[in-house]
Image (cartoon, grey):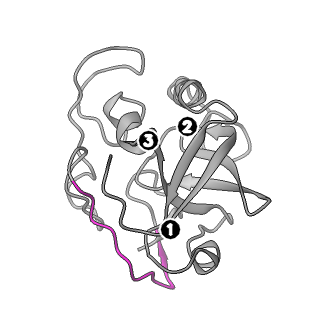
Amino acid sequence: MAELRGTTVETSIVRVVDGDTVAVTILGREEKLRLSHLGTEESNHGSDKPVTPWGKKAKERATQLLPAGSPVTLEFAGNEPLAVCLERYRDNFGRLLVWLHQDGQDFQERMIAEGYSPYFNTSTATPTSTATTTATWPPSGSPRRPTSVSGTRSRSTAPSSATTPCWGCGGPCGPS
């Protein structure tokens, strides 16, 4: 299992919203999660971004991997008490910013390795191919620089009050 360094909470999946967004229940309240360091294309209408076949495939794969009721572990960037994390680690849309782990596996790394995040892949693999992909996680020149897909990630434990654009999707995915 990946070394978990932030505050964690055990919960279960309510539903998959998109390839990089899921819903869970925490303390009796349904919460949408924006999965940190994972950027998939859109599968739902409702934003200014177009729905794409890649986005639909990413949601389909996430739904296969995370069926409703699946137990998961959520990890926050910091190690404050859960109540603080639930307030502090949110994007501009109110979604919690977390890493998701299932059965000891980092879900974000799995989706990237399988080719569902075109922002990180440098191969011509498709979401359904078995071709080996090389992740550029993040692309060079990025303000955030986790070390590798299979290595440990660099995680800031000091949240910023400013939100910078995500290097994966260009959107407001979280604190810098």
**Which amino acid, mark 3?**
Phe
First in sequence: mark 3 vs mark 1: 3
**Where is residue 123 drawn, in percent x and y?**
23, 27
Q: In this rendering, is residue 38 above or below 80?
A: above
Q: Is residue 159 magenta?
A: yes
Q: Earlier in the sequence, mark 3 or mark 2?
A: 2
Q: Which residue is mark 2?
A: 19
Main secondary structure of the magenta stretch: loop
Tag 3 near tag 2, CB within 8 Å: no
Q: Nearer the viewer, mark 3 or mark 2?
A: 3
Distance of label 3 from label 2 (alpha carbons): 11 Å
Image-based side of 76 in relation to 13, left or right: left
| Residue designated by label 1 | 174
**Label 3, label 1: how many angstroms apart (C-alpha)?**
18 Å
Q: Is residue 52 magenta?
A: no
Q: Residues within 10 Å of mark 1 (few under 14, many from 20)?
A: many
Q: Secondary structure at mark 1?
A: strand
Residue type marked 1: Gly
The residue indicated by pointer 3 is: 107
- Residue 122's image quarter? top left
Q: Which residues are magenta?
A: 152-164
Residue 48 shows in this picture: no
When the figure is inspected, residue 123 is found, relative to residue 164, above or below; the finding is above
> Callout 2: 10 Å neighbours few (<14), some, many (20+)?
many
172 relative position to 14: left or right? left
CA–CA distance between discs 1 and 2?
A: 17 Å
Mark 3 residue crowding within 10 angstroms, few (<14) / some (14–19) / many (20+) = many
The spot of residue 60 in percent (x, y) is 58, 24
